[in-house]
Image: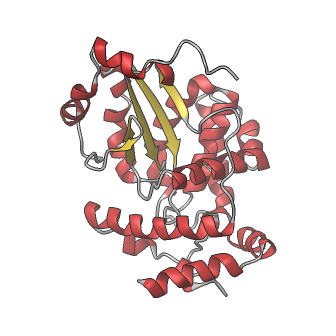
Amino acid sequence: MLVGVVLVLYCATTQSEEQHESFDSQYGHNAFLGFAPVSKAKNVCPSLLANPSEMMAPTTEKRMVARVWSLLLVVATAAQQRVPIPKGGVDGFRCGAAATNASLQLDLFLDLACDDCKAAWPTLKSLPTAFPGMSFVLHLFPLPYHLFAFELAKSAHVVAVHNRTALWRWVDAVFAAQPKYQPPADDLTRSIVEESLADLAASLRITSRELMRSEIASGAIDEETRIGWKYGCTRSVAATPSFFVNGVLADDANAEWGLKEWHQLLDPLVPSTRDLGVRKPMDACPSP
């Protein structure tokens, strides 16, 4: 285990910025986390490669493997570069109560290419209705071993910028279309997936085909998506779906939970009037 950590750190700290850029351009954005398709990778540190077939274990084992790989990757990323501070506020797509007035805050870290996230989504999107005082925040965390996860995440950022009110409808649509972008679709390329997402956006009248196609390839959207992933790393996210309630990891929550399980977790956390005073924002800030 120690040897693996040392090897990851060695690879992360010895690659130059030019090597990273070359690696990205050669293998596409599936390599944006330091991973490349095993069949294509050349001259790449073997500790940074993941075989997607090995990740198809039962849910508990898969989450453990994902957590180990991702935590190693967080260490390597931290050694390589600083995490940018998000512009315009904390990362994520928010609905419901404002964070300062929320009786509950739920942060979801989801991957649009993850089948567990797809299975959990119908229940998750009903939670703001079940808990009216909730602040509901979606963070996109594309996993490196999910093919085209980065492209799917970028498409959501495009919608958030250009037609924000349609974001939840877009998440529904991408989850519905998810099987199109999963193995064994060996004939797919990043360009074909982006074309398909542009067609989907146009068919749903969410954006024009041209806008989605151009924006999903833009540097600004690419950067926003990377910053979102790096923000997840700072929260020690290592698998999807992951849930934080009032800033604390809800490690027992999983994709199989229904409303009953969520009520069992969240109902005791809904504050009384007396409790609200403890965390109510102060009327004034400290004097300079």
Which residue is farthest front? Answer: 288
Asked whether 115 or 23 is in front, the reply is 23
Task: Give above or below for 108 relative to 143.
Answer: above
Asked whether 213 or 235 is in front, the reply is 235
Percent x, y for residue 151? 61, 52
Asked whether 2 or 129 is in front, the reply is 2
Q: Assign the C terminus to one quadrant of the image.
A: top right
Task: Give above or below for 66 relative to 278.
Answer: below
Percent x, y for residue 143? 50, 59
Task: Give above or below for 282 relative to 29.
Answer: above
Which quadrant of the structure image shows residue 93? top right
Please count the marks in the image: 0
Which quadrant of the structure image shows residue 239? bottom left
Percent x, y for residue 195? 67, 49
Which quadrant of the structure image shows residue 202? top right
- Residue drawn at x 49%, y 53% is 180
Colouring scheme applied when the structure was drawn: secondary structure
- Residue drawn at x 28%, y 67% is 61
Q: Assign the N terminus to one quadrant of the image.
A: bottom left
- Residue drawn at x 58%, y 47% is 153
- Residue drawn at x 45%, y 54% is 237
Asked if residue 263 lies left or right of residue 4, the reply is left
Residue 49 visible, this orientation: yes
Asked if residue 180 lies left or right of residue 22, the reply is left
